[in-house]
Image (spheres, rainbow, N blue to C red):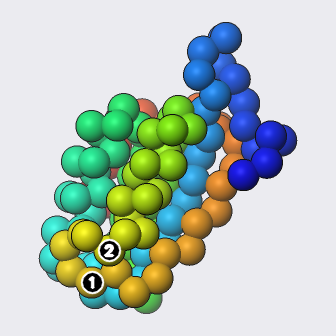
């Protein structure tokens, strides 16, 4: 992650947004609930959404360390179902998310 992808909000911690496309057997196994629970515990906002191609898209925004931890949890494969691959895209925080939804 490069510095131009990071922003500081009102002198607070640096915040980012990431999108994770999680491939494998991740629908119908509680994966979105797992992602939402972990994200909320880390103080993140965003969503976990089933995609028609069988993947789950997780969008999370918050403190860099918390986002990195959620990304690590998604990548390790210690999740419900089976995680074969996780594609991560990091960018600047947009500040337009509220709570963490499972859709």
Pointer 1 with pointer 2, Cβ within 8 A? yes
The residue at which mark 1 appears reads as 82
In percent of the image, x 28 and y 48: which residue is there? 38
x and y, in percent, of residue 60 in the image: 48, 48
- Up-down relation of residue 14 to residue 54 (above or below): above
Q: CA distance from mark 1 to mark 2?
A: 7 Å
In the rendered structure, find residue 92 and report the number of the disc placed on it. Answer: none
Mark 2 lies on a secondary structure that is loop
Check disc 2: other Cα within 10 Å, few if <14, some if 14-19, many if 20+: some
The residue at which mark 2 appears reads as 77
In percent of the image, x 76 and y 44: which residue is there? 5
In the image, is 60 to the left or to the right of 47?
A: right
Quadrant in the picture for the C terminus? bottom left
Disc 1 or 2, which lies upstream in sequence? 2
In percent of the image, x 72 and y 30: which residue is there? 7
- Up-down relation of residue 98 to residue 51 (above or below): above
- Up-down relation of residue 73 to residue 22 (above or below): above
């Amino acid at each position: 992650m490069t510095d131009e992808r990071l922003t500081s909000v009102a002198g607070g911690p640096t915040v980012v947004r990431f999108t994770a496309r999680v491939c494998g057997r991740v629908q119908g196994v509680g994966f979105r609930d797992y992602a939402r629970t972990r994200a909320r515990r880390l103080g993140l906002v965003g969503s976990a959404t089933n995609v028609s191609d069988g993947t789950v898209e997780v969008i999370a925004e918050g403190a860099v360390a918390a986002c990195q931890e959620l990304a690590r949890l998604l990548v390790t494969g210690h999740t419900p179902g089976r995680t074969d691959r996780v594609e991560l895209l990091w960018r600047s925080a947009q500040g337009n998310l509220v709570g963490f939804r499972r859709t």
